[in-house]
Amino acid sequence: MDEKSVKAVNEAFIRMHEKGVIYRANRLVNWSCTLNSAISDIEVDKVELTGRTMLSVPGYKEKVEFGVLLSFAYKVEDSDEEIIVATTRLETMLGDTAVAVHPEDDRWENTYCG
């Protein structure tokens, strides 16, 4: 956005916050990959899964696998070491450009991080 629009958006959010119309909090955001947008809680069917489950998803011809935690390893540059990462969305790793680790985590004290 151009600078004028940024100022207008910031001013609008500040005013709404001061009036109590909106608030700031750490919350889960429901993201629709089909719409490429955040969606409301009332638009989400919440389902508790106890393990691997195949579910029908609008926009997909075949059922989609849910409830599985997959692990894969990133090679540490100029090293034989690996950093193992676990995810429920393996396809997102194709967009990864870096892995962040906590600087005080002893597991990484001998690994080049920075």
Image (cartoon, rainbow, N blue to C red):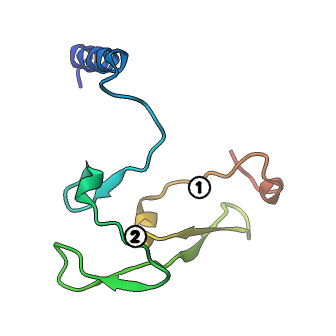
Tag 2: residue type?
A: Glu
Give the residue drawn at x 57%, y 75%: 71
Which x, y percent locates residue 73?
Answer: 61, 72
In this rendering, position of residue 16 left or right of residue 48: left
Mark number displayed over residue 91: 2
Above or below, 68 relative to 13: below
The quadrant where residue 81 appears: bottom right
**How many residues crowd mark 1 within 10 Å: few (<14), some (14–19), many (20+)?**
few
The residue tagged 1 is: 99
Give the residue drawn at x 21%, y 18%: 5
Under circle 1, the secondary element is: loop
Q: Quadrant of the N terminus?
A: top left
Above or below, 22 relative to 109: above
The quadrant where residue 36 appears: bottom left
Tag 1: residue type?
A: Val
Lower position in the chain sequence, tag 1 or tag 2? 2
Query: 9 and 44: which one is in front?
Result: 44
Which x, y percent locates residue 83?
Answer: 67, 66
Give the residue drawn at x 67%, y 52%: 101
Mark number displayed over residue 44: none
Whether pointer 1 and pointer 2 mark residues with C-beta atoms closer than 8 Å, the reply is: no
Under circle 2, the secondary element is: helix
Q: Quadrant of the C terminus?
A: top right
Distance of label 1 from label 2 (alpha carbons): 16 Å
Which x, y percent locates residue 78?
Answer: 70, 61
Which x, y percent locates residue 75?
Answer: 64, 68
The quadrant where residue 15 appears: top left
